[in-house]
Structures are given as C-alpha cells and as structure tokens.
Amino acid sequence: MRPTRHPARAAIRPMGAPHHRIAGAALALGALVLALPAGAQESGETIITSHGYTNVGELKYGPDMEHLDYVNPDAPKGGEISEWTMGTFDSFNSYSREGVAAALNALPYERIMTPVADDPYGLYCYLCTTLEYPESRDWVIFNLRDDVTFADGTPMTAEDLKFTNELFLEQGITEYRNVVDGFLDSVEVLGPHRIKFTFAEEAPRRDVIGFAGGTIAFSKDWFEKTGARIDESRKEPFLGTGAYELKDFDINRRVVYGRNENFWGADHPLNIGRNNFDSIRIEYFADSAAAFEGFKSGEYTFRIENSSKDWATGYDFPAIQKGWVVTEEIPRGDIGTAQAFVFNLDDPTWQDPRVREAIGLMFNFEWSNESLFYGLYERVESFWENSDLEATGTPSEAERAILAPLVEEGLLDESILTEEARRAPVLDAASNTPARSTYREAGRLLDEAGWTVGDDGLRRKDGELLEVVFLQRSPQFDRVVNPFIENLARLGVRGVLERVDTSQYVERLRSGDFDLVNHTFSMGFEPGVGLEQWYASKTADDSSRNLMRLRSEAVDRLVKAVIDADTLDELTTATHALDRVLRAEMFWVPQWYKDVHTVAYYDQYRHPENMPPLALGEMDFWWYDAEAAEELRAEGALR
C-alpha cells in the first residue's frame, strides 16, 4: 500500500518564494493584505509591511512569537554531535566549481529571511525586522536589524548585502547566473539598515521576494581586505554571521564547527531552542562499511541510516545490546525524494528514448526491495512523489489545455493527451530475472532502434557495442547495480560497474563523462524558478542538478508555465503537466524512497516530542543530555 499523499505545500528553501496576486481557493491576496499592516499608498497600490511573507492564507507565526512551536525553549546548551560523510574534501567553498567542498561548509552563513519547518509556505524576517512591498511585487524593502554582527564582531549593514548580491551575480556558478540573470533592475542602499531590491519586469513575481530574501550576508570589508573570491577553492570559510564557525579540520579526515560565543542571534525568537550543541563534528570515511564500523565503536555518535540492509540486519551489535545506542524511525512529511539512475543525454546512444526505455525495463525494483531492501522502500513514480503535485491517471481538461499546443507544434507526442501518467514497470519479486515478455518488449525496442544481436549474443549498431557504464563511488551500491547488469547481459547489453574516488566522481559529473549515474531529485511543494536549474535547456551544459543534460523545448515551456502560475490551482495543474512530460522523457530509471527518517544515535541526545513534518533537525533543535553522556562515558561506551 502506498503511503497517504500530502497536500501541496511550499518548498522549505530560501529561493522557494511564494507568489503574489492570488485569487481563489485559500490564496486570496485580500486575506493577506487584511492580515498584515498596510502602509502608505504608492502609484495606487497598497504597500504591505510585515514580519514575513506568504502567499497562502496567513503566516503561522505572528510578529510577537516567543519561539517556534516545535522546539524545546528550555533545551540546554552544550556537548557535541558528530556524524559521518563519505569521500574527501579540499575546500570550504561550495559556491565554486573548483575543489570538493567540506561538509556543512555553509553553516556559518545566514540569509535575510528564513523558512521554518512547520510553516511550509512562510518566509520570516531574520536579519530583518520587517519587509515592505507593493501588491505588484515590483520591489521589496528590507528593514534590517541593527544588532547583527559578523563572527569577528563587526556590524552587518545594508552595504554588505548589496555587495553579496553583486558578488554572486559576478562570480556565482553558471547555473545560478543562468537562472537569475535579469531578475533585478537595481539594488539600492537606503540607509545603514535599509535596502531595496527593484525587480525587472520579466522576473517571475512568485519568486522575487524569496530571491531577495535569500541573500546571504557576507562582509564587504572582509572580502576587500582578503581578496577572496567565491569562484575559487578555499582552505578557509568566508566570514559569516551564523551561530557556528569553523574550529578545526584535518583534510580528508574530519571537520569541526564550534559555537560562536559572541553570536548576535542567540536570543532571537527564531533561535530559541535551537543551535544547542557546542560543536558539530563530521568524520570522513572511504566507504559506508568502514563508516558503520566507526559508528559501532563510537568514532561518531549520530547516524542517519541509508542502507536498508544495515537497518534491517546490522543493528544488533554490542552497543545496541547494552542500551548505549538507540534506533528510531521518525515520520517525514516532505515530498518523497525521487532517487534514480539518470542517463547522460549528451551521449548519442542515450538520445533514443527506445534505448532508454529498454534499459530501464531491466531494473527489477520489486525483487530488489524484497531481496535486498527488506521491503523498506516504495517505488518512485513521480518527481513530486507522495504529494498532490504528482500527476496521476489521464490528463485533466486543464492539463490538456496546457499540453495540446505543444502537441500541435510537434514538441510532444499526441499520446500524452490520452495516456495515463507513465509508471515504472512492475516486475516479479520472486526472481531478479524479468519475465520473457519483458525481455521481448525490451528486445523489440532495441531492434527498432537499430541495436541488433550478433553471433556473440551482444548488441551492436554500426559496429559499435551497446555498453552501459554505471559510474559509482560507493561499494554499497554494488549489490544494486550487479543484478541490473546481469539482466542487461541477458538482453545482449554489456554493463560495466566503474567505481571511482570522490574527486574523480565530482569531475566526471561536471564534464558529463558517464552513461548512468545516481541522482536525487528534491522538489519543493511550491515549485518556481528553481526548476530551471533542474530541467531547463539553458542549464544543461553546466549544472549540478540537470545532470542528465536535458534539453527539451516542451519541458522549457512547461517549466515557464509553472513559474507563471497565478493561483494554487494553476500551479498544481501546470506541475501535473510538467511531471507527466518529465516522466515520459524516460531520462531516468526510478529507484525508491521512504517516508521515515531512520536514525541511530548514542543515547545522549534528545529531541522535541512534537517533531515538525519538514525537518529531522538533529543538528538544529535536538540537544545534548549531559547526565546521560556522562553515564555512557563511565560505562566505556564513548571514546
């Protein structure tokens, strides 16, 4: 049985801003204007002044909130939380394509506005006290706090935010600049703590305030003194305003962030009950097996388990038996993360959808789930899995109205108007080997595409062997890929598992040197301009999200329809149409998702009873139980 689907909600992402000009359902702008204090009139428009921004109903939290509902306001401060990651690092700058950035390298940085984990449509003033904007969303003014300081004690001003915006537009990665180029007409400093963003006429109004509110606070003076650039690899972070700063690191082994004892925002209502640990440590391991052994021996203390095999069979080691380590499944309410293999569409071999479909038929999820994953996963079917944004059944009349012009122009096959949304094939769970009918269908597709079987049983076209190279960096996935390769071999396709280290893996993704690679699609409840980084043709040459190098005019047009949607109904319909077409493109072999967080940790951490639906928050609003930790140390549980 598939889990209950969640209603459409906004992305908890700084760039995922809500929309203006809402008319209908629960989205009436009138309700927003009445709920928020209005200022003077300008050009006949009401100027809205608020402590936050939303386009759906009202903000959950008012301007006088004391703390978030899901935190423990009395949570003690202290202790350390430690986790693991795989691979290596040689930089503390994730905004550059150079180097491999360290885990949590952006932890010291803060933005003008912030989301929260139980108000999926809301963005709240954080570095600001209020924002002002007209109903047209042609501009926004942020009235900044006058008590924000950088980690070195210097004050943050509007000049710093103007500088940061210009820095990213000049030196930011190409995929970012390709999306936001043309958003702004101007950024003006109106005073030491007052800044105005004026948006270009063509900028999508549903995204503009979130775009401006997502501006990071970097120190202009620090950048000018150091000569640092965000497009270069760095062995030290930039100066930030956050609760944590880099304390220690050992390249390729560990990185430690410590509390900034002079953090300006310790008493901010949005921070009460948060930032509870004195330090956050990340240990690096070459592979997941070594990392699991490290957890068992206490090298680190909190583990988010992503191996179904380990979750089902591995948690019976001495620390569990002695009660030192506890395991927990915590429900999650976000959109199901769509994990998949994706094809490199720049390779001519994979540009034929018949070939992609045939390859995808050889992955047996049902057998994998029962035999390898202990039945813990659900199959991914949609890019908006487990939400009302997922396309289902045949297109509605409203969807057909969006899709029909693309069919008429020859950009989509007319079957998109009448067929049900594409779903992954359901194979036999009793055996990895697909049924003969599945092989016949896959063989037919390859024959039609010109890939015929030779005397040696392998398929060739124009003398070229049909070969699929699976680029991997973790041996944990061998047990998934190898059965897939076995099925391909029976079809006459040579499969190759190529495992490389982290630096090679990152470089080959960037250069497009792969056939199939793992990818994770994390979509928001209120999709907007960020979709261009995932699916737009203009990002295909250089994107960390559009790994498949998708170039489709139909998809480009549908992405624009989503961005331009004025109401929740329009947004939902346009997203249904986009989801339907993305799935029909078959650039992926969908894998699986799960609707719970599976975690294990040494019994020295505590979390609120009322966990929010959209965040696990173990480094955010969990806390350290010093008495329990002392007992663990006394018993020899921890090093």
Image: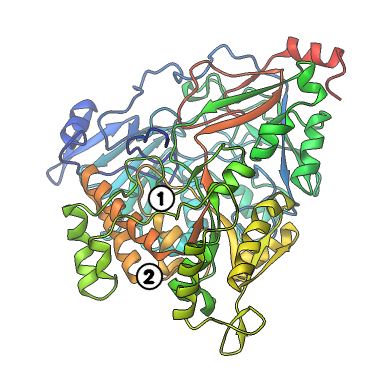
- Classify residue 31 as left or right of residue 562: left
- Classify residue 109 as left or right of residue 122: right
Q: Quadrant of the C terminus?
A: top right
Q: Is residue 623 visible?
A: yes
Question: Which residue position holds label 1?
Answer: 382
User: Looking at the image, which residue is at 16% across and 33% down?
Assistant: 30
**Nearer the observer, 281 or 592:** 592
Nearer mark to the viewer, of 1 and 2: 1
Kindly identify the amino acid type of the residue bearing the numbered disc 1: Ser
Which quarter of the figure has residue 299?
Answer: top right
- Classify residue 325 as left or right of residue 239: right
Q: Is residue 522 above or below residue 329?
A: below
Residue 210 in picture, x, y percent from top left? 38, 44
Which quarter of the figure has residue 333?
Answer: top left
Q: Is residue 170 visible?
A: no
Q: Please give the label number shown on residue 412.
A: none
Q: Please give the label number shown on residue 552.
A: 2
Q: CA distance from mark 1 to mark 2?
A: 18 Å
Mark 1 lies on a secondary structure that is loop
User: Looking at the image, which residue is at 67% across and 65% down?
Assistant: 507
